[in-house]
Image: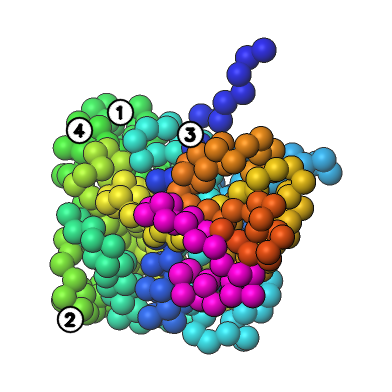
Amino acid sequence: MTKIIAPKGTKDLFKPEILKWQFLEARIRQFFSRFLFQEIRTPIFEHSELFQKGIGSETEVVQKEMYTFRDKANRSITLRPENTPSVVRAIMENNLLTEIFPVRFFYIGPMFRYDKPQKGRFRQFHQFGVEIFGEASAEVDAELIFSAFGFLNEVNIEDIEIYINSVGCPQCRPRFLPELQAAAQKQQNELCPDCQRKISTNPLRIFDCKKQQCIDISNQFPKITDYLCQDCHDHFQVVQRTLSTFEVPFISNPRLVRGLDYYTRTVFEITSGQLGAQDALLGGGRYDHLFQELGGKDIPATGFAAGIERIILHLDEIPETKTSIIFIAYQNAALKTEAIKLSAYLRKKGLPVFMDYNARNIKKQFKKSDRVGAAFTFILGEDEIANQSISVKNMKTTEQIQIKREDLDQWLRKHM
Ligand code: HAM
């Protein structure tokens, strides 16, 4: 029989790497509470329409990367490729705008994209993200970038660059796009086939192309920042000024467009020099019209999401916090029931306990006690049962003492 292995682009997590995940998740919860974010959990799968409408039908994510299938009732279902449309749906469906203030959420969880796996790129990957609703001011965008930067610093990731841009709004973008298309058409034959297709379908995406020749050509194209309407221009100025007030270093990059269609005004990405081609640690921006596009009211919104696997690549090993384990050894099978009772008693007290239910002799049990790294082995023999006591062996010093059952709690308080 062929061996069943994990699907391509997925991975199992266990010690020691999982210690980094636990550390990171705890830090996320702690850090983002400073900005009044509360946790939200949305389903892993949604109706496909949510992502088609929310992300944009011409995006790579929707065109090529979604895990979409029919369920048994023939509904089109998609494993979430990202969480922003789901959070918007959840807020509308549960009326959270009227129930919670401020409407600021964070999430941590798996996302799914049929991407080509490589270092830092998976098909099941994990994001933590934050979303802010009902706050339109440019300072909020700056605060969001400050929080992302601050968080990376907090977990000691320092070799990073912050790129920001404004992609305008439905008023100014239509003035820019024909100019961009015209410039691209002039050099159509020199662009790669993918970029040639994007000229008519989604010209902004040409700036995303990683091929050097397309980068060189598109560097000469008109810049969106030269076409911003007055409001978008002012908004972008305030974002930059406030970032300076927050002492966040940034690079303004007019090529930054992001791969999802819902953005308006501010967009940003934080990249790391250590990641190679998959260099984006996180990305986000303002999306003031997504609510309306999904059938809701006109609610301004802004947010970002970070790739947890990519952040984990930057973290140093996390030392395991050692807890003192008690191993319970019993001299013969007849004493097993007493040993089980003792294990239940200790676990109810909140202590980590291990025992071997198939133990054949005491020597083998001591070996197992060593293997689990027990601090103490509690030994139950005929003598101990007869005089209502327990022998306790300190596994480090090998010293062994006998304590009375009635003194057990006192001993535990002193040693555990
Ligand atoms: P995104 O740029 O598509 O934005 O993804 C955010 C981050 O997720 C990326 O910067 C990267 O670190 C990580 N990521 C994306 N795809 C993969 C993959 N295949 N393997 C590993 N990591 C990956 C969004 O998802 C938006 N929802 C962000 C946002 C929130 N915008 C506003 N609010």
Start-end of magenta stretch: 392-416
Q: Residue at x 65, y 58 (%)?
A: 384
* Callout 1 secondary element: loop
Q: Position of residue 35 (x, y in %)?
A: 39, 80
Look at the image and tell me whether residue 325 can be seen: no
Q: Is mark 3 within 8 Å of ligand 1?
A: yes
- Front disc: 1 or 4: 4
The image shows residue 290 at horizontal and vertical percentages of: 52, 65
- The amino acid at mark 1 is Cys
First in residue order: circle 1 vs circle 4: 1
Q: Earlier in the sequence, mark 2 or mark 3?
A: 3
Q: Which one is earlier in the sequence, the residue at label 1 or at label 3?
A: 3
Callout in the foreground (2, 1)? 2
Q: Amino acid at mark 3?
A: Gly
Q: Secondary structure at mark 3?
A: loop
Residue carrying label 1: 192
Q: Nearer the viewer, mark 2 or mark 3?
A: 3
Disc 2: which residue: 245
C-alpha distance separating marks 2 and 3: 41 Å
